[in-house]
Image (cartoon, coloured by chain):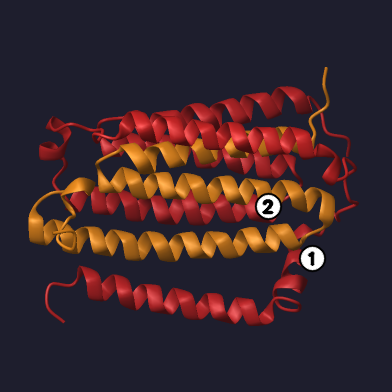
Chain colours: A orange, B red
Amino acid sequence: MVPITTLHYLVVAAALFVLGVIGVLTRRNVVIVLMSIELILNAVNLNLVAFSRIYGLHGQVFAIFVITDAAAEAAVGLGILIAFFRNKETVNMDEVDLLKW
Amino acid sequence: MQPVATTFFFYFLSGLTVIAGVLVITRRNPVHSALALILALLGQAGLYLMLYAPFVAGVQIILYAGGIMVLFLFVIMLVNIEKSQKEEQFNKQWVVGILAAVALGVLFVLVYTKGKSLFPDRVAQLPEQSNTQQIAVMLYGNYMFTFEIASLLLLVAIIGAVVMAKKRI
């Protein structure tokens, strides 16, 4: 049996990060795009906690700050989503193009 | 205490997390995505426990699985999902998006495996019994200023969310 090292955790975090990036780049539903951003932030947190196993507790403290950021980002993002839905009656990402034309 | 069956629990929890992550980005119904995301977050909390970070695991369950996901579910109820479920779920650039993301992931794994010698493979002697206490000491000691800025950030986010979501101020 191969012992579980930091590298294993980093690979899992990379997989989660890639899943989040795929969600952000390909989905049209804004709610699911926001959930994918949460996946990306969670991958970063897993990296931080995995490295805190080597370098001391700073990584865990930083992970808590990242969770705070994620909460703030989710609140503001969902507020924007509600405002957008009230104006255009849709939740599709590619119909947010008022500034584009 | 010596941990038992570390290998089994690692592969179980990481498999759970990754499969739930795949479900998050493929489901048509956003409620199913949210439930899968809760599963992924719980699996990740288990991984935190395996890394001797019980406080972060608790914060993950309380704040993410308990707080942020309730916010998500409320917003899903507020917007009309019946109409969007009948539409196309992926945008036109999905092939390029998947290719770019997978290339990024391959790059990550290459960097991790080639640069394995850059970080030591030992583990630090972290305090296992008093993890919460140690984090509190650092949070209110070294990171006091950052902590205050985080509280200010949350205040701004609350005001911003109310301003965005309210019909007329």
User: Where does the image place residue B44, in percent across and percent down from the top left?
Assistant: 59, 40
- The answer to whether residue B76 shows anywhere in this view is yes
Spatial CA span between label 2 and label 1: 17 Å
Residue beneath label 1, please? Answer: B134
Q: Considering the numbered disc 2 on the image, is that residue within a helix, a strand or a loop?
A: helix
Which residue sits at x=54%, y=59%?
A: A67
Q: Residue at x 25, y 63 (%)?
A: A80
Mark sitting on residue B34: none
Identified by mark 2, the residue type is Leu
Question: In this figure, what is the number of numbered marks?
Answer: 2
User: Given the image, what chain letter belongs to the residue carrying mark 2?
Assistant: A
Residue B28 lies, in percent from the top left, at 25, 30
Q: Is residue B8 above or below residue A48?
A: above
Front one among A78 and B66: A78
**In the depicted view, which residue is nearer to us: B39 or B129?**
B39
- Mark 1 belongs to which amino acid? Gln
Q: Position of residue A12 (x, y in %)?
A: 62, 34
The image quadrant where one finds the C terminus of chain B is bottom left
Neighbor class of circle 1 (other Cα within 10 Å; few <14, some 14-19, many 20+) is some
Q: Is there one chain holding both mark 2 and mark 1?
A: no
Compared to residue B110, the image places residue A63 above or below, namely below
Q: Pointers 2 and 1 in contact (CB under 8 A)?
A: no
* Direction from residue B24 to residue A68 in the image, left or right: right
State whether residue B34 appears in this view: no
Q: Is residue A86 left or right of residue B6?
A: left
Vertical comparison of B16 with A62: above or below: above
Indicate the secondary structure of the residue bearing disc 1.
Answer: helix
Give the class, few, some or many, for how many residues have Cα within 10 Å of label 2's Cα (few <14, many ≥20). many
Q: Quadrant of the N terminus of chain B?
A: top right
Q: Which residue is mark 2?
A: A48
Q: Position of residue A96 (x, y in %)?
A: 18, 54
Which residue: 45% across, 49% down? A38
